[in-house]
Image (cartoon, helix red, strand yellow):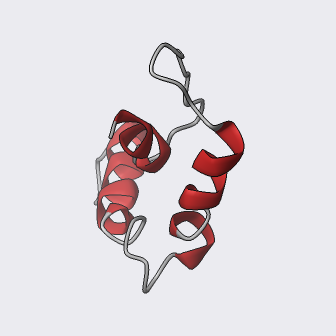
Amino acid sequence: MSGSTHDDRIRAAFTSQAATFEDPRLNVAFTSSVPWLLDQMAPGIEDIVLDVAGGTGIVSRALAN
C-alpha cells in the first residue's frame, strides 16, 4: 500500500472487515440486539428515525422493513 493516502487505507481496512459486520456467526454483539432494540423503540408508521453512526445500516434496514 505504499503511496496510498490515509483515506485509501481507511477505505481498504473497512472494505476488508465490512462483510463480517452483519454475519451473526461473527458479530453477535450487533446483530442479536436488533430485535430487542426495535421492540424498545416500537416505531410507528409515521415516525421519523435518524440512525446515527449507522455503520452498515443494520438498524436502518430493520426499521425500513
Q: Residue 49 or 29: which is nearer the viewer?
A: 49
Q: Residue 33's x, y, as percent? A: 62, 63
Q: Which residue is at 32% across, 40% downward?
A: 65
Q: Residue furthest right?
A: 40
| Figure check: 14 above or below 55 | below
| Point 48% across, 13% down: residue | 46
Q: Residue at x 58, y 47 (%)?
A: 38
With respect to residue 60, does 58 lie above or below?
A: below
Query: Residue 28 at x, y = what percent?
Result: 55, 77
Q: Residue 43 falls in which quadrant of the image?
A: top right
Q: Residue at x 49, y 45 (%)?
A: 59
Q: In this figure, what is the number of numbered marks?
A: 0
Q: Position of residue 25 (x, y in %)?
A: 43, 86
The answer to which of 12 and 30 lies nearer the viewer is 30
Q: Quadrant of the N terminus?
A: bottom left
40 to 49, vertically: above or below: below
Q: Is residue 27 left or right of residue 17?
A: right
- Residue closer to the observer: 30 or 10: 30
Viewer-side residue, 62 vs 12: 62
Q: Is residue 4 found left or right of 33 in the rendered image?
A: left
